[in-house]
Image: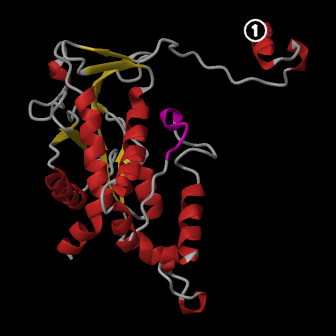
Amino acid sequence: LLSMVAKEAGCAPEELIDVDLYVYDHQPAALGGVYEEFISSQRLDNLVGTFSVIRALIESVSEQHGVAELSADPNIRFVACYDNEECGSESAQGAKTHFTEWVLRRLCACGGGGGESVASRNGTEFEEAIGKSFMISADQAHASHPNYKEKHEDQHRPRFHGGVVVKVNTNQRYATTSRTHAILKQIAHLAECPLQKFVVRNDMPCGSTVGPFLSSNLGVQTIDVGCAMLAMHSIREFTCTSSIAQAVSLFTAFYKHLPAVLGSLQ
């Protein structure tokens, strides 16, 4: 094995200092279904969320009048993508790092494009910005499996093509609150994007995301959402194409309409 690695690296095996090796599915992603409405691929959790939020950020300024809207937006549109979520996020590049706060503090120290002079600032820009901010934690969601319907509550069975899933847990394994859910509902209405709601069965353990500890560490109001999928954490995962389009539409509307929606709730 080391000889193979050394050959790819163009060196002798004894010259290798250390290696990081991962087992992964080398088959390309594939469309399936009668209408090619499904995607089978490795790492859908959470490349679907990563792709959707980055695509939405780009589309929020690439549409007609997008640049003009951006210049008038009082907010900074921001995407943060992290490593090591599946093993606890406790790394320099994971969501539990202080790096996120440091970046946000530096953005606030730069004035965020507001045009005010350094002398006019009072040193609380970061704290004031946090109080006006909103975060979407975009991870994947477990769809109801037709062979294991008993794993979900009757009224909380995420399904394919049914819209982005809002994840709720009273033990704060998800960061969703009634307020953040209400805000996203308004944005989803503007985007004409359906939403689903998921609450885990109360006799089953619940997974988590980066949302709760980012929300608690930063003090940012947060909602946990995701696209429905099957075979999560398998080497080959399964989702539907429409959920990605719905997520991009919802997140694009989030970037464009959040200031107006927050203003309407004041």
In this picture, is 135 found above or below 148? below
In this view, the residue farthest toward the front is: 64
Q: Please give the range of residues in magenta.
A: 81-87
Q: State the residue in front, 134 or 37.
A: 37
x and y percentages locating residue 164 in the rendered image: 23, 40
Residue at the spot 52% in from the left edge and 33% down from the top edge: 87
* Callout 1 crowding tier (Cα within 10 Å): few <14, some 14–19, many ≥20: few
Locate residue 169: give its quadrant: top left
Q: How many marks?
A: 1
Residue at the spot 20% in from the left edge and 23% down from the top edge: 151
Residue type indicated by callout 1: Met
Locate residue 7: give its quadrant: top right
x and y percentages locating residue 17 in the rendered image: 85, 25
Residue identified by numbered label 1: 4
Q: State the residue in front, 117 or 229.
A: 117
x and y percentages locating residue 217 in the rendered image: 47, 59
